[in-house]
């Protein structure tokens, strides 16, 4: 089955068309595969959205994608809200607080650091950069237990700072700002500012920062998402239930769902749909951000580097 | 902004950067000041914990030197090798799936004619990435229960009539890989697609003039240019995979302990620390994980030539 | 002023001994004066046998329960509106998850944040909660040195507090006795014309008959992690003999274990034993109205049968009979959990914590009126039986439950590691994939041995 592009003009010059499949069989295969995977990715989410509008019985009895009713959605929401005295809202707010606080700190720390690595000279600059890259690629969970012991020594365990501070150490953020400043800050601009008499701090605040909005948004995106979704660190650092972020709180919710935990068939138990609603609530901010952030993903992941 | 885009979309011409004039009069202290908070954090949360873990892993509980005794004890634990196998198998399956399918799907998405179709397909693939960790596990708990799942008929066709059968420990590496693929693949497909977009049209045109078909173009032109991305994706996936903790922990809870609470190496480290009160053993496991991944990432960074560490000043 | 003195005294051992002596004297005096005893034993400010945190009698207490026990907390707050109670639900350490132990371990390191009262579904937590770990004080408060009045402690059914007793001291209160009995659907049994088996052999024969004549009906379940506690324990299988504080003897392949294993295999093969958990929606869907009988603990009554989210058996159908026995062996039975309540030694309001623990284990408001299982506290147990019988829900007398309470075989211990977790990890997958338990008892033996050794036991 030839897939050769036959659309060559009579004079031999080809039309300016990007490589496209012209053979029907290959096109059909591509379409089939893409649709198949599309279903694979989409079905669980569609099911989730339908499930939280149903009651427990409707979930098992009716078809998976039949929508329920607004009334059931409200009921599930009330069930979730009243669980253990409103602790779910509390967990959600905890997540917001920890992630935002860590985000602010991350920006305060990473942006100047990336700027310095990119534009200033000082000893050990290269070492710091290489260290940053190495640490960036390492798994963070293997350090959680030693960090726990560190925090323990200074008595921070159980304190929100014990998650906010470790989260503020974000080598990937430093790397992104390094790339950004080294590629899009014209050196001439900086020298001109220095000649004009600005000290380094003023150069940073008056020249570099105003131009840094894209990278700030980028770092904010990655940092927030990573912090919001983090489980192991807060699981260990914040053992009391009212300090949990929502991700860790999900495990408590799971423990209270009778279908998944036999001893929990009791007064404070959760039905399946309420658990499904909790799942959605736990990712809501990130989901909203994701809906608008494909661009960020490309820019961030492809940043500067992968040298040709 | 255009500079960022040029730099950021990596492949293809980098665009020449004007060499910056170096001022020999520029003092070093501003740079040091700017990086100090970062360095402090790096020491406190990067270097010191690693050092502390190493010290702990070679110490006895009362502080004396223990040499490799902790490592021996931990690796001799009957749960260590299975946990290692679980993580290795999981990473292996996931990596293969990621490399093969992500590249394949990215290439296919690139072939789609209509722009709206391309955009919506990318969007659908990308959205599951918003659910990470605990949330995606909870969602998949529903998916894996033949009684409640929308794909129940698939599970029953596979011979599983109950949740307990679906998550039998021998199926777990595949299930965990599927969950990880579901959340992670979309983002990488989008990134690879972006990379594919940067391949110069002239190059492709020339290939087609030479008579190459779509498949040949994929094999001889697009794939080689994607190789570095694939390597990058692999390294990040390996690092993420060794961190396996939340998925088996929640599955353990949901499955009445059919999935044990020491399924992965990280869980084992946690059990050592808090059930057996053996911090030294726990540190030994952490150090093991650290060394393996630090080596891999160091090799990748310095030899892979993937990252540009040269500043321009 | 006295609190300061109190603190300084407690810091030194001699101080503590002197205080303890003084306490004893004042306790004796209090007893002889015949005054009304406050809910907390020997006078305020007593040492109760452990170093206390600074006490604040109006401090709220934090209680960790599983969601099943949330009703107990609600009953307490209703009866004691003056006590502020903060509830946290967790998994109750079910299925050997160890979450109670690991969370307390984390809090020990944090040095703060301990709950005041904790409920655990497991029976082996006293083993670690009574010990100092890493130089930190033991989490579990000693209860028999004044914190709980001796009258209350003595009111528990004989043997109920055994899992709570370490080195002669009591560290927790037992919630309910979970002795295994034979539950059956009297209406179905009569309808099908079957007679109730009294021995495991008869049970096996009857199950085979049921499989033939009424396929799809159940005579028992092995889908939950407590299967060894129902079948192996009752068969006097020697897989769980705790011989010392750090020693176990594991003989999981002997004839007693073999016969129970063969019974399980036969039942799984002819599908009279369910392989799904009794609490899963799948179980309810498949077997509602089809459970002929089920060997199981006393709390099955309220949790499985008389439960609208589970089997929802109508009134007048559920009967209970004496637990099955192997022919020729003395009649013994097993026990599935029963739950234990711990008071934290770090509590800042021991008076309220003690009041709470006593209420939830002994009060009629909870144990008689609301509890799904057979209370461990003697007086409450008798009232629970009469209340259940008078509710006319049951088709038979509940005497077998009372009798079975005294038949729990003592050869099955409560080591620090979880039997349920080992079974769920090693044997349940075999059941689910259709393999034989009897042929794989060595696997169980090895798994138990490994787990015991890793937890620090020497294994014979």
Image: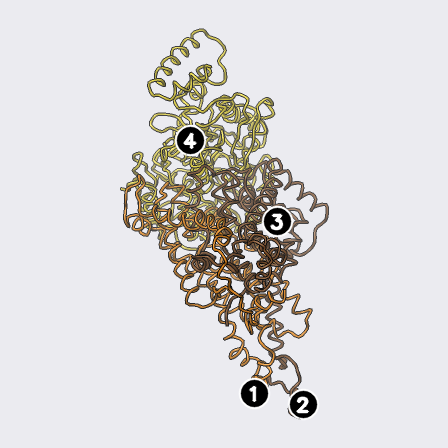
Chain colours: A brown, B orange, C yellow
Q: Which residue in the structure is indicated by mark 3?
A: A276
Decide: is B293 above or below C217: below
Decide: is C225 above or below A193: above
- From this viewpoint, which residue is outermost toward the top? C33
Q: Which residue in the structure is indicated by mark 2?
A: A9
Mark 1 to mark 2: distance in Å?
15 Å
Determine the secondary structure under disc 2: loop
Chain letter of the residue beneath label 3 in the structure image: A
Determine the secondary structure under disc 1: loop
Label 4: few (<14), some or many (≥20) within 10 Å? many
Decide: is C1 above or below A39: above
Chain letter of the residue beneath label 2 in the structure image: A
Q: Is residue C26 visible?
A: yes
Mark 2 to mark 4: distance in Å?
86 Å
Closer to us: mark 3 or mark 4?
Answer: 4
Q: Which mark is residue B210?
A: 1
Left or right, B253 with reference to B193: left
Mark 1 to mark 4: distance in Å?
78 Å
Mark 2 to mark 3: distance in Å?
58 Å
Q: Which mark is residue C139?
A: 4
Determine the secondary structure under disc 4: loop
Label 2: few (<14), some or many (≥20) within 10 Å? few
Q: Nearer the viewer, residue B197 or A278?
A: B197
Q: Nearer the viewer, residue C7 or A35?
A: C7
């Amino acid at each position: 089955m030839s897939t050769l592009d036959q659309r060559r003009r009579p004079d031999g010059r080809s039309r300016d068309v990007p490589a496209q499949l012209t053979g029907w069989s290959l096109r059909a295969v591509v379409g089939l595969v893409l649709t198949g995977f599309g279903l694979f990715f989409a079905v669980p989410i569609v099911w989730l959205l339908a499930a939280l509008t149903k009651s427990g019985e409707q979930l098992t009895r009716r078809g998976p994608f039949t929508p329920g009713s607004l009334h059931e959605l409200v009921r599930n929401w009330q069930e979730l809200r009243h669980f253990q005295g409103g602790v779910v809202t509390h967990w959600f707010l905890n997540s917001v607080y920890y992630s935002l606080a860590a985000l602010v700190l991350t920006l305060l720390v990473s942006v100047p650091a990336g700027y310095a690595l990119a534009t200033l000279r000082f000893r050990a600059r290269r070492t710091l950069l290489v260290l940053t890259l190495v640490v960036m690629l390492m798994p963070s969970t293997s350090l959680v237990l030693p960090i726990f012991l560190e925090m323990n020594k200074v008595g921070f365990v159980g304190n929100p700072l014990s998650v906010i501070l470790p989260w503020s150490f974000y080598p990937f953020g430093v790397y992104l700002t390094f790339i950004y400043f080294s590629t899009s800050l014209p050196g001439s601009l900086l020298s001109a500012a220095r000649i004009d008499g600005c000290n380094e701090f003023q150069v940073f605040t008056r020249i570099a920062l105003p131009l840094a909005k894209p990278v700030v948004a980028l770092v904010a995106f990655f940092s927030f998402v990573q912090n919001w979704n983090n489980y192991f660190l807060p699981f260990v650092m914040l053992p009391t239930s009212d300090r949990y972020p929502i991700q860790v709180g999900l495990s408590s919710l799971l423990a209270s769902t009778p279908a998944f935990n036999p001893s929990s068939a009791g007064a404070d138990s959760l039905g399946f749909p309420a658990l499904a609603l909790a799942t959605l609530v736990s990712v809501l901010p990130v989901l909203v951000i994701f809906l608008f952030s494909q661009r960020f993903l490309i820019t961030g992941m492809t940043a500067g580097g992968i040298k040709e | 902004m255009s500079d960022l885009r040029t730099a950021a979309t990596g492949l293809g011409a980098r665009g020449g950067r004007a060499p910056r004039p170096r001022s020999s009069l520029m003092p070093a202290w501003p740079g040091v000041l700017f990086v100090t908070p970062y360095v402090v954090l790096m020491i406190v949360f990067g270097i010191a914990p690693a050092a502390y873990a190493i010290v702990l892993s070679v110490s006895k509980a009362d502080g004396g030197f223990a040499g490799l005794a902790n490592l021996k004890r931990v690796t001799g634990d009957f749960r260590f090798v299975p946990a290692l196998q679980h993580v290795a198998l999981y990473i292996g399956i996931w990596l293969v799936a990621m490399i093969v399918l992500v590249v394949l799907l990215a290439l296919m998405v690139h072939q789609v004619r209509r722009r709206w179709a391309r955009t919506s397909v990318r969007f659908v693939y990308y959205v599951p990435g918003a659910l990470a960790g605990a949330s995606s596990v909870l969602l998949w708990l529903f998916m894996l229960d033949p009684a409640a799942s929308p794909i129940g008929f698939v599970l029953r066709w596979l011979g599983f009539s109950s949740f307990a059968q679906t998550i039998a420990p021998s199926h777990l590496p595949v299930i965990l890989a599927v969950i990880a693929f579901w959340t992670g693949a979309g983002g990488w497909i989008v990134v690879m697609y972006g990379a594919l977009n940067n391949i110069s049209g002239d190059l492709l045109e020339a290939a087609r003039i030479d008579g190459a078909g779509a498949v040949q173009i994929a094999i001889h032109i697009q794939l080689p240019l994607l190789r570095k991305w694939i390597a990058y994706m692999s390294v990040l996936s390996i690092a993420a995979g060794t961190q396996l903790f939340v998925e088996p922990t929640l599955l353990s809870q949901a499955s009445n302990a059919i999935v044990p609470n020491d399924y992965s190496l990280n869980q084992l480290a946690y059990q050592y620390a808090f059930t057996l009160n053996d911090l030294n053993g726990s540190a030994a496991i952490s150090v093991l994980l650290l060394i393996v991944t630090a080596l891999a990432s160091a090799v990748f960074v310095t030899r892979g030539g993937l990252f540009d560490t040269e500043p321009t000043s | 002023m006295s609190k300061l003195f109190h603190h300084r005294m407690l810091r030194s051992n001699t101080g503590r001994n002197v205080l303890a002596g003084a306490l004893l004297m004042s306790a004796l005096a209090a007893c002889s004066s015949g005054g009304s005893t406050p809910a907390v034993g020997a006078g305020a400010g007593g040492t109760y046998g452990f170093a206390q945190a600074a006490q604040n009698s109006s401090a709220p207490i934090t209680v960790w329960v599983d969601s099943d026990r949330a009703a107990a907390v609600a009953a307490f707050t209703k009866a004691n509106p003056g006590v502020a109670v903060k509830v946290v639900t967790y998994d109750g350490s079910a299925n050997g998850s160890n979450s109670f132990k690991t969370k307390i371990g984390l809090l020990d390191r944090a040095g703060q944040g301990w709950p005041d009262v904790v409920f655990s579904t497991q029976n082996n937590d006293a083993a670690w909660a009574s010990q100092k770990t890493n130089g930190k004080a033991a989490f579990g408060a000693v209860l028999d040195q004044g914190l709980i009045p001796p009258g209350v402690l003595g009111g528990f059914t004989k043997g109920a507090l055994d899992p709570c007793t370490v080195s002669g001291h009591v560290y927790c209160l037992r919630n309910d006795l979970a002795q295994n009995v034979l539950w059956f659907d009297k209406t179905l049994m009569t309808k099908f014309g079957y007679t109730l088996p009294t021995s495991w052999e008869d049970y096996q024969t009857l199950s085979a008959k049921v499989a033939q004549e009424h396929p799809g009906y159940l005579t028992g379940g092995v889908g939950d992690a407590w299967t060894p506690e129902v079948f192996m324990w009752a068969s006097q299988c020697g897989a769980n003999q705790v011989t010392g504080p750090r020693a176990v003897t594991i003989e999981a392949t002997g004839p007693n274990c073999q016969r129970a294993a063969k019974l399980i295999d036969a039942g799984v093969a002819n599908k009279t034993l369910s392989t799904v958990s009794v609490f899963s929606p799948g179980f309810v869907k498949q077997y509602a109205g089809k459970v002929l009988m089920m060997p199981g603990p006393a709390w099955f009554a309220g949790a499985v049968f008389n439960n609208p989210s589970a089997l929802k058996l109508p009134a007048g159908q559920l009967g209970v009979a004496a637990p099955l026995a192997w022919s020729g062996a003395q009649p013994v039975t097993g026990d599935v959990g029963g739950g234990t309540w711990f008071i934290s030694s770090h509590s800042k309001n021991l008076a309220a914590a003690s009041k709470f623990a006593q209420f939830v284990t002994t009060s009629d408001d909870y144990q008689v009126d609301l509890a799904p299982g057979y209370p461990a506290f003697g007086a409450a147990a008798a009232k629970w039986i009469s209340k259940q019988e008078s509710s006319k829900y049951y088709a038979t007398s509940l005497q077998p439950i009372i009798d079975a309470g005294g038949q729990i075989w003592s050869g099955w211990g409560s080591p620090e590691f979880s039997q349920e977790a080992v079974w769920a990890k090693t044997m349940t997958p075999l059941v689910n994939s259709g393999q034989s338990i009897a042929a794989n008892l060595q696997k169980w033996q090895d798994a138990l041995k490994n787990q015991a050794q890793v937890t620090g036991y020497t294994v014979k």
